[in-house]
Amino acid sequence: MARRYDPDRRQRIIDAAIRVVGEKGLTGLSHRSAAAEADVPLGSTTYHFKTLDELMVAALRQASEGFAKVVASRGGLEDPRPDLAAELAGCLGEWLAGDRTGVELEYELYLAALRRPALRPVAAEWADDVARQIARHTDPVTARALVALMDGICLQVLLTGVPYDEGYAREVLARMIPRAR
């Protein structure tokens, strides 16, 4: 029997893994659950992703694009002299107001790196990329601190159910940004 050419199968498996995690959490993700959701044979998942960690890495890499897309679509960090606190607070607000399931999924996969070392480099890539964009407007140490603060704000909104307060976020972010001399 000839092998069926299916160039999109790997991507369908990643998309299915993201849906499984969104519906059942990380504990519900397995090669079998991803295969069932993608409507592909189990062997296809293990062919493309030898381990569950490999599948999670691919899912995290794709899921973590959400915030980056918001930053890119707003374009404020491309301005040479943005109101950095306002722009970052606006990015957070737009992201958190979007697809809540997607944001929760992004954080669930991001936090999975605590227990799954294979996910740590991908989680670090996200933080490093955001910090690099911010560092064009401030020093690298402040940029990393701003990323950490933004993470904390997002976690509080996601975990407590308290609505995002853009004014509060702008104010606390501004307190961390050194004033020009």
Image (cartoon, rainbow, N blue to C red):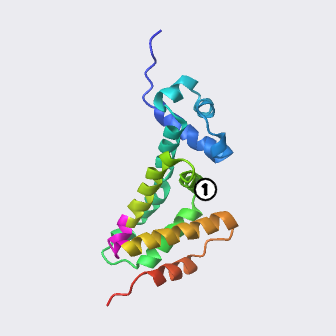
The residue furthest top is 1
The residue furthest bottom is 181
Check the image and report above or below for 119 versus 164.
Answer: above
Q: Nearer the viewer, residue 120 or 102?
A: 120
Instruction: Please indicate whether residue 25 sits to the left or right of residue 53 in the image.
Output: right
Q: Position of residue 131 (x, y in %)?
A: 40, 66
Q: Note whether residue 72 is visible.
A: no
Which image quarter: residue 34? top right
- Residue 135 forms part of the magenta stretch: yes
Q: Position of residue 86 (x, y in %)?
A: 46, 77
**Residue at x 67%, y 45% (from the top left corner):** 23
Magenta stretch bounds:
132-140
Q: Nearer the viewer, residue 104 or 108?
A: 108
Q: Position of residue 73 (x, y in %)?
A: 42, 61
Instruction: Please indicate whether residue 161 sits to the left or right of residue 63 in the image.
Output: right
Q: Nearer the viewer, residue 170 or 138?
A: 138
Mark 1: secondary structure: helix
**Residue at x 45%, y 51% (from the top left corner):** 122
- Residue 11 forms part of the magenta stretch: no
**Amino acid at pointer 1:** Glu
Q: Note whether residue 131 is visible.
A: yes
Count every numbered label the image shows and give the total: 1
Q: Position of residue 125 (x, y in %)?
A: 41, 55
Q: Which image quarter is the C terminus in?
A: bottom left
Check the image and report above or below for 20 versus 125.
Answer: above
**Residue at x 51%, y 50% (from the top left corner):** 63
Mark 1: give few (<14), some (14-19) or many (20+) Cα within 10 Å: some
Which residue carries the number 1 mark?
104
**Residue at x 57%, y 25% (from the top left corner):** 42
